[in-house]
Image (tube, rainbow, N blue to C red):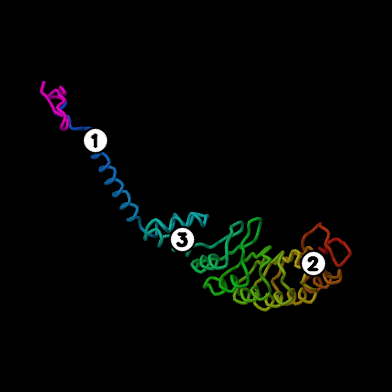
Amino acid sequence: MTTFFLGYVGIKVPVTSTDLSSPKPPKKKKTLFCSSLSLNSMEEEAEIDRLPTDLLAHILVMITSFTDLAQASGVCRNWKQGVKQALARRQTLSFAGCKMDDDSTARLVRHAYSLKELDISRNRWGCQITDNGLYQISLAKCVSNLTSISLWGITGITDKGVVQLITRANSLQHLNVGGTFITDESLSAIANSCPRLKSIVLWSCRHVTETGLFVLVSKCRKLESINVWGIRVPLECFIGLLTIRPALQIKPQGLPLNVGAVTVLPVV
């Protein structure tokens, strides 16, 4: 046994040789263990960074959440490039239910070079898209290849934005503009710009008239289906449309249409 003095006070504390030879070895081991974890973490990050961008993009293209894609693009430079390639391979984009604005929506569409179907319908939360957003989207390279567009329920758009977008969507086959405030001006643009149009939804487009419908049906020779629920036009209009195109399906079938002030059965 030896004697050890604490500070300037001569207090003799008995200390065994075993105590003096134990300078906290557990902490050293813990420090070494943490260093080992840090090195392993660095090695794992390096492995992720070496993942081929093409393979990464193939995985990321399966992610449907734009929030998740945004987070993935912030992992590293390689992942950011992978997200861009994943968007470039996308053939469908749906913003339905997402709270999107003009700039963010247009930015994503611009990177989706292979896009065929675009859905920016508004529901409970809705896309807050305006004419400015449609104008920005119309400048994207993919617009001329779009076969399907849904603008259902977007009340912030007018003929100005719809015409700007539609005149560039020459491959369009399916269009949903139900619940919007478009007029015959938009129908005229559709008739002149979309010769391949097969179906159109004009659900509750109350500012559309029989004149616009006749122009649309006359020029879109491949038109097979039209949804006119809630449109206020005379009954003779539907008969006239069927005269022009007898095989045309006027929807909804089996539901009453509100024609002027009179409720009648749909012409099918």
Residue 234 lies, with reference to residue 35, above or below; the image says below
State the SS at label 1. helix
Q: Residue 171, percent across and down? A: 60, 72
Labels 3 and 1 touching (C-beta < 8 A): no
Provide the residue designation for mark 2.
Answer: 231
Labels 2 and 1 touching (C-beta < 8 A): no
Provide the residue designation for mark 1.
Answer: 27
State the SS at label 2. loop
Q: Quadrant of the C terminus?
A: bottom right
Q: Alpha-carbon neighbours of circle 2 within 10 Å: few (<14), some, or many (≥20)?
A: many
| Magenta residue span | 1-18
Judged by its main secondary structure, the magenta piece is strand
State the residue in front, 11 or 140.
11
- Residue 97's mark? none
Residue 41 lies, with reference to residue 120, above or below; the image says above
Is 80 on the left or on the right of 231, as rendered? Answer: left
Question: In percent of the image, x 61 and y 62: which residue is there?
Answer: 127
Residue extending farthest to the top is 1
Provide the residue designation for mark 3.
Answer: 86
Q: Earlier in the sequence, mark 2 or mark 1?
A: 1
Tag 1: residue type?
A: Lys
Q: Disc 2 and disc 1: Cα gap in Å?
A: 79 Å
Camera-nearest label, 2 or 1: 1
Residue extending farthest to the right is 262
